[in-house]
Image: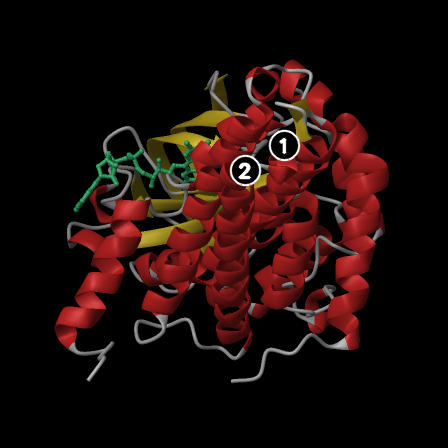
Amino acid sequence: MDYELTDAHKLIRDTAKRIAKEKVAPRAAEMDESGEYPHDIFDAFAEAGLLGLTIPEQYGGSGAGFMALALAVEETAKYCNSSALILLLSALSTQPINLGGSEEQKHEWLSKSATGAIKGAFCLTEPNSGSDAAALESRAVRDGDDYIIDGEKMYISGGSVAHYVCYFAKSGQNGSKSISGFIIPTDSPGFSVPACDRKMGVIGIPTANILLQDCRVSAANRIGEEGRAFKTAMLTLNTCRPVVGARGLGLAEGAIAYALDFARERKTFGQPLVEHQAIQFMLADAAIDIEASRQLVYHAAWLVDQGKYDREHAPYLSIAKAYATETGNRVASDAIQILGAQGYMKDHPLERHYRDARQLMIVEGTSQIQRLVIARAMINGDITYW
Ligand SMILES: Cc1cc2nc3c(=O)[nH]c(=O)nc-3n(C[C@H](O)[C@H](O)[C@H](O)COP(=O)(O)OP(=O)(O)OC[C@H]3O[C@@H](n4cnc5c(N)ncnc54)[C@H](O)[C@@H]3O)c2cc1C
């Protein structure tokens, strides 16, 4: 196990740090208020080459990998989780094609995604299937050289600003073995976005309902073989788990750093807050959780970069996702506590971090689903402690 950062990793981290400080931080509160997608932040990431980190070089990306993406996400999430989600989506929306697509699809869709010429979204969740993704009800019926797809997807991050979506639908009656994936341009006839949800946090990135009605899609846009895409969807989620963890990690770092600065200045009972042991313990607990999260997230990202994201390694990706996102929640809460009433007010970023953190324990496999993966591995003997 060697997940020492390379010079390339450090350069990417420093680039993301600069963009986060100069461009993301000043916009974070405003995009949280307006709910408008921050195209300028997307463009800044594109210009810096941060949207193609997980796309191989032969398809126009840098191939820097998931550790590089996790570092960029961590730096960004210190200030703004909506902006960090833009980076995450650069992987989530392209991984189905990267893992399961044809050479032609990779050349066409990945290269444009890597430069930021187009945006994608990942469409798995439906009104009647979230954690139990194999229960999805969207239908794809073959019609000559095309498929006719009908169905509804819910909570799709960036779905209303996407140029294409990776869409999962059943093309047979054989449960998860009937799930096929499709690349669907969002200007296809029969594709619509009836609404975006009002939500608690991560407000800068719209969460869209997607409706397909008699949507005709060329069979050339099917991702991999018919009925084989459930595994592609699950592996996509596995590879992205360390990156969701990095959203929690960065959020925790940004929140406690802000609280520490405040606690040096604010005085109670004649002393700065940092001199009170109860405050010191909250600071120390945050550091313990953050350092543990960082080891888990970096290790998990390193595993993905080694090609280790199959069933055997999945529990370690789940552990990183669960621990780091729960760290984000614990630390955001404590950071508010350190500020007292001021932490609850919109004059400070902590109430936004707290609302944003809550999303992380739900998306891309809830905390409970991560624990199912981990416990199953223990019961099956894939993880042993003897
Ligand atoms: C802001 C936001 C953005 C999202 N973006 C996307 C996106 O881009 N693409 C996409 O496809 N989806 C997206 N999602 C959907 C997300 O992936 C799902 O919400 C998630 O998978 C959980 O599904 P669910 O909400 O239907 O909850 P359910 O599956 O109905 O679960 C409800 C509760 O029961 C628990 N539970 C379920 N099954 C079990 C079990 N077997 N054992 C123990 N507990 C269980 C869950 O942990 C949860 O607490 C997004 C969600 C949000 C909130």
Q: Say if 272 sits above or below 347 in the image.
A: below
Say which quadrant the C terminus sits in.
Answer: bottom left
Q: Position of residue 47 (x, y in %)?
A: 85, 49
Q: Amino acid at mark 2?
A: Ile
- Badge 2 marks a residue whose secondary structure is helix
Q: What sort of colour scheme is used for the picture? A: secondary structure
Would you say 347 lies left or right of 201 here? right
Q: Where, by quadrant of the figure, is residue 268 drawn? A: top right
Is residue 363 at least partly visible in the picture? yes
Where does residue 378 sit, x and y in percent of width and height? 19, 71
* Label 1 or label 2, whichever comes before in sequence order: 1
Q: Which residue is mark 1?
A: 273
List x then y, in percent, for residue 335.
55, 34
Task: Tell me if mark 1 has few (under 14), some (14-19) or many (20+) residues whose alpha carbon lies within 10 angstroms of its own.
Answer: many
Question: Could you say whether the residue bearing mark 1 is in a helix, strand or loop?
Answer: helix
Q: Residue furthest front?
A: 270
Marks 1 and 2 in Cβ contact (< 8 Å): yes
Disc on res. 183: none
Residue at the image point whose x is 72% and y is 19% from the top:
30
Q: Position of residue 308 (x, y in %)?
A: 44, 77
Q: Choose top left, top right, bottom left or bottom right for residue 56.
A: bottom right
Residue on which the image places disc 2:
279
For the residues labelled 1 and 2, the Cα–Cα distance comes to 7 Å
Q: Mark 1 belongs to which amino acid?
A: Leu
> As rendered, which of 164 and 36 lies closer to the eye?
36
